[in-house]
Image (tube, helix red, strand yellow):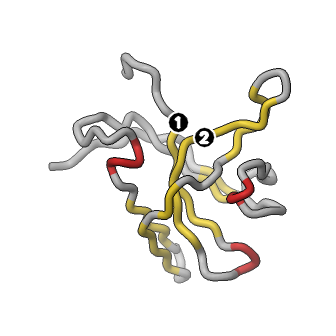
Amino acid sequence: MPTEQAIPNFAGMESDAGQTPSFFDGETSSINTTHGKFLTYPPAQGIQGSFTLSSPGTITLTVPVADVGGNSNATLFSITGLSVTQSTSSSTGDTLFNPSIHESRFFEVFRLG
């Protein structure tokens, strides 16, 4: 179990209106009123990524260690995935997404090597 405060990082792929996708990462943010009520995922850095359209389909995201704290010995404790739709681009920083089309249960990640 983590012993220090976790930073909620994310990585994503976005395709606006079926255009060529962009790949990015960043830190989870929120739209605040009196306190954070809605999580947002504003892109901070472009990253390398690819995808396949063939079934079952694969999205591959390569996140540089520097983008997630810079410690190559840090432990990633869990990860989850989801696919959603939204009415505006994530780059606005205040985009709310529609209810999830599909999401995975979180799972533990183990570092190999």
> For mark 1, what is the residue?
8
Question: Toward which corner of the image does residue 2 lie, by quadrant?
Answer: top left
Q: Nearer the viewer, residue 38 or 70?
A: 70
Tell me the distance, in whole angstroms, between the alpha carbons under discs 2 and 1. 6 Å
**How packed is label 2: few (under 14 Cα within 10 Å), some, or many (20 or more)?**
some
Q: Position of residue 84 (x, y in %)?
A: 71, 58
Which label sits on residue 28?
2
Q: Considering only vertical position in the picture, is 19 above or below 84?
A: below
Q: Nearer the viewer, residue 42 or 74?
A: 42
Q: Position of residue 73 (x, y in %)?
A: 23, 37
Q: Amino acid at mark 1?
A: Pro
Residue at left 79%, top 49%?
96
**How packed is label 1: few (under 14 Cα within 10 Å), some, or many (20 or more)?**
few
- Image check: 81 left or right of 37? left
Q: Secondary structure at mark 2?
A: loop
Which label sits on residue 48?
none
If the image is split into quadrants, where does the N terminus sit? top left
Mark nearer the N terminus (2 vs 1): 1
Q: Amino acid at mark 2?
A: Thr
- Image check: 89 left or right of 113? right
Question: Toward which corner of the image does residue 4 lie, by quadrant?
Answer: top left
Residue at left 49%, top 75%?
51
Q: Secondary structure at mark 1?
A: loop
Q: Position of residue 17 (x, y in %)?
A: 76, 77
Disc 2 + disc 1, Cβ < 8 Å: yes
- Image check: 70 left or right of 29? left
Q: Position of residue 36 (x, y in %)?
A: 75, 28
Q: Considering only vertical position in the picture, is 42 above or below 4?
A: below
Q: Nearer the viewer, residue 32 or 73?
A: 32
Residue at left 47%, top 43%?
79
